[in-house]
Image: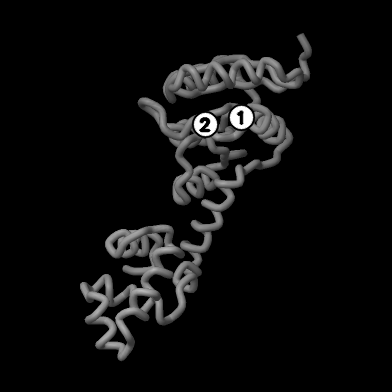
Amino acid sequence: MRSDRIKVLIADDHPLYRTGLVDTVKRRPELELVGQAEDGSAALDEIRTVGPDVCVLDVKMPGLGGVEVLKTLEREGTDVRVVFVSAYYDSDVVYGALGCGAAGYLSKDATGDEICDALVAASQGRTTLGADVQAAVAREIRRRSGDEERLLTPREYEILRMTADGGSAPDIARRLHLGATTVKTHLQRVYEKLGVSDRAAAVAEAMRRGILD
């Protein structure tokens, strides 16, 4: 057995997905599978026992989630790199994971080879983000820097604010001396920019992003 291979541990509570990833890792000559786990607590025990170089963790697992596992490893000073592979990549979750020191974050749509490449990169001190995850991080950075408000034009923001205050399209049109159709057009553009389909969802999403308070 080659001693210079990268030791990998995989933790995921979905048996079929975990098995598929295990098989992929075993086919990569530069990687050596040293353990696997089905939840966060078991992952911690395995990491402490076998000392992998890199871990694959899902964010949401029974008991301890992946981010909690990473935080524990950081507190203990464990020398291991963590790559998250998850179906969940909300912008705040990804941002938080990277802030805790994650060496990568990919969606479960990533191919086995993409995940293995990320493991190799992690072992070399590099960070890998999937395309969808990169977009999520960019959104979160904009939100935290206040740039999300500039996503909307001044008129769109004004109409969104009046909508949040309970104004209907005809009411807003009268107050702004605009046609009702014009107001509806502005609202439709707001929906598109926020990725929603109705008034209530637009207000909720704007509040989540910090555009409205």
Residue 18, position as x, y percentages in the image: 52, 20
* Residue placed most toward the observer, 17 or 59: 17
Does the CB distance between marks 1 and 2 fall below 8 Å? yes
Q: Position of residue 141 (x, y in %)?
A: 53, 59
> Which mark, residue 73?
2
Give the CA distance from mark 1 to mark 2: 8 Å
Front residue (pair 49, 22) = 22
Name the mark on residue 80.
1
Above/below status of 39 relative to 184: above
Query: x, y (%) of residue 182?
Result: 37, 80
- Residue at horizontal 53 percent and vertical 47 percent from the top: 99
Amino acid under disc 1: Val
Report the residue that reaches farthest toward the bottom: 177
Q: Write the residue at 52% across / 51% down.
A: 136
Bin the neighbour count of mark 1 within 10 Å (Cα to Cα): few under 14, some 14-19, many 20 and up: some
Locate the N terminus and report the quarter of the image it occupies.
top right
Q: In the rendered image, which quarter is residue 173 located in? A: bottom left
